[in-house]
Amino acid sequence: MALIEVDGLTRSFRTWKKEPGLRGALRGLLARQYEESFAVRDISFRIEEGEFVGFLGPNGAGKTTTLKMLAGLLHPTRGSARVLGFTPWERKDGYRRQFALLLGQKNQLWWDLPARDSLELNAKIYGITPSVFTQTVGDLAALLQIGDKLGTPVRELSLGERMKCELIAALLHQPRVLFLDEPTIGLDVVSARVVRDFLRQHNLLRRTTILLTSHYMADIQELCERVIIIDRGIISFDGKLAAILDRFADFKIVTLHLDPVAVRETTDPTAYGEVLVHDATTLKLKVKRERVIPVCKGLLDGFPVLDFAVEEVPIEEVIRQVFQHSQGPPS
């Protein structure tokens, strides 16, 4: 039996549709018109113990709603889910002690207190002994390189430092299942790298089952072999990440910042890839992955380059292609 089982899970919201003007307001007092919108519609999937799964989709796709249902914060309109053998929205104590939900844009630590004080409070709530608490916090803080900041008030920590402390709080009771919603959002390159390395190592050592949402392709590529893509509340892909990259994201974006004063070469940029932008100061190309290195060399030799960058395709573009493909050609 899978650790997480989701069958036909649906969450809809009923909203009042108000007509404009005073007449519409008065009419709404007598006979309101409602419309139903679906955040999640009839989704099903299975996740085995120890899997690290990416849960992807554009803003408003239904990712966070799904995580909140699996964490028991929302009741579904219909459908079922079992996590660790429990129905999440029944909120049984045995389940709450075995999972953690970390929302990248929400704080669980007391803002005006040192992070250690919030961690000690969590330890009391979960019944963690002082010796286990000290050992666990010490190990997690060392891996996250944040040990010297636990005595600092949370409001004085940087965004990256706060997120590391939030991770310690989420993992303090050693949950078997971890739901992560945008854990690296807004972090600098170094902090994001530390968080990713930590999550990878924790998954390997503890066999913690992790469901991760992120808009950063680097998070998904480095951590997840399997991805589930959801758009408009519907799952459009569930499988290996490599299959998506090979089929829908087999190119990168190369951007050159050009010197408009320098003498321009007559090199034709279309020989290197699909031209997205080309003006006096910028050249942006879509280049096949296997050609990135030789293309960059040719561009540097043929154009007055001040700076350049090589970037992954935006995750929204990959998702859009996957979703459009799943819908089939227009009739």
Image (spheres, grey):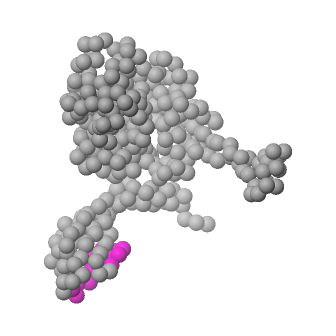
Residue drawn where x is 19% and y is 66% of the image: 293
Q: Quadrant of the N terminus?
A: top left
Residue drawn where x is 82% and y is 50% of the image: 27
66 on left or right of 100? right
Q: Picture coordinates of residue 40 (x, y %)?
A: 57, 43
- Snapshot quadrant of residue 15: top right
Q: Quadrant of the C terminus?
A: bottom right
Which residues, given as a range, are shown in magenta? 264-278
Q: Is residue 181 visible?
A: no
108 on left or right of 260? right
Q: How many marks?
A: 0
- Snapshot quadrant of residue 113: top left
- Snapshot quadrant of residue 118: top left
Q: Picture coordinates of residue 142 (x, y %)?
A: 20, 30
Residue drawn where x is 41% and y is 34% of the image: 107
Question: In this picture, is 297 found above or below 30?
Answer: below
Q: Is residue 12 magenta?
A: no
Residue drawn where x is 23% and y is 19% of the image: 135
Q: Is residue 192 visible?
A: yes
Q: Picture coordinates of residue 239 (x, y %)?
A: 41, 46
Question: In this picture, is 286 found above or below 197?
Answer: below
Most extreme residue toward the right is 30
